[in-house]
Image (cartoon, helix red, strand yellow):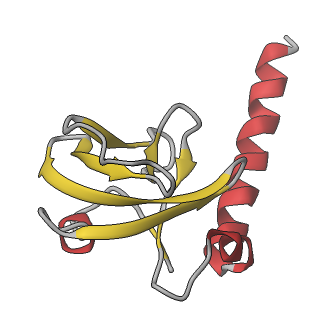
Amino acid sequence: MKILFFNTSLKDRLPIGEVVRLGYNCINVGEFLWETTKFSKDRVCGKFFYKGDNEWSAEGEYLYKCVKTTLLCRGSGAEPLWILKDYENPKDIRYHEDYEWYTLWRKKEDKKMKERLSV
């Protein structure tokens, strides 16, 4: 399992035309298959498939860089994505050493936001 940062090695981890299994476990827990079709300045374009769906999404979906952390995310929740190996489960993400780093960072950012809002 590997957390995905938007950096130069991303093209090696999400090669165009290859299907990879991505998971998330921050606020929601789940996984999906992802196929990259192209890279842009701040997005990875492609299509996804969730278990239980009958077909792949249309091309034009994207993964994006969370501005503050440079983590790769999908959807409006800005949950970081992880590459999962065949035997790994999205529930296992909470026990990974990088998860602790992310949650500590997030708590610090939430505290800053609360301080700004209370002024």
The answer to whether 67 is drawn above or below residue 47 in the figure is: above
Q: Quadrant of residue 35?
A: bottom left
- Residue drawn at (32%, 70%) of the image: 20
Q: Position of residue 41 (x, y in %)?
A: 17, 41
Instruction: Locate residue 36 relative to residue 111 in the image: left or right.
Output: left
Observer-nearest of 20 and 8:
20
The residue sitting at the top extreme is 119
- Residue drawn at (21%, 34%) of the image: 60
The answer to whether 7 is drawn above or below residue 89 in the figure is: above
The answer to whether 76 is drawn above or below residue 30 in the figure is: above
Observer-nearest of 113 and 93:
93
Q: How many marks?
A: 0
Q: Position of residue 73 (x, y in %)?
A: 46, 47
The residue sitting at the bottom extreme is 87
- Residue drawn at (74%, 78%) of the image: 95
Q: Quadrant of residue 45?
A: top left
Location of the C terminus by quadrant is top right
Instruction: Locate residue 15 relative to residue 118 in the image: left or right.
Output: left
Q: Position of residue 18 (x, y in %)?
A: 18, 69
- Residue drawn at (73%, 70%) of the image: 94
Q: Position of residue 22 (x, y in %)?
A: 44, 64
The residue sitting at the right extreme is 118
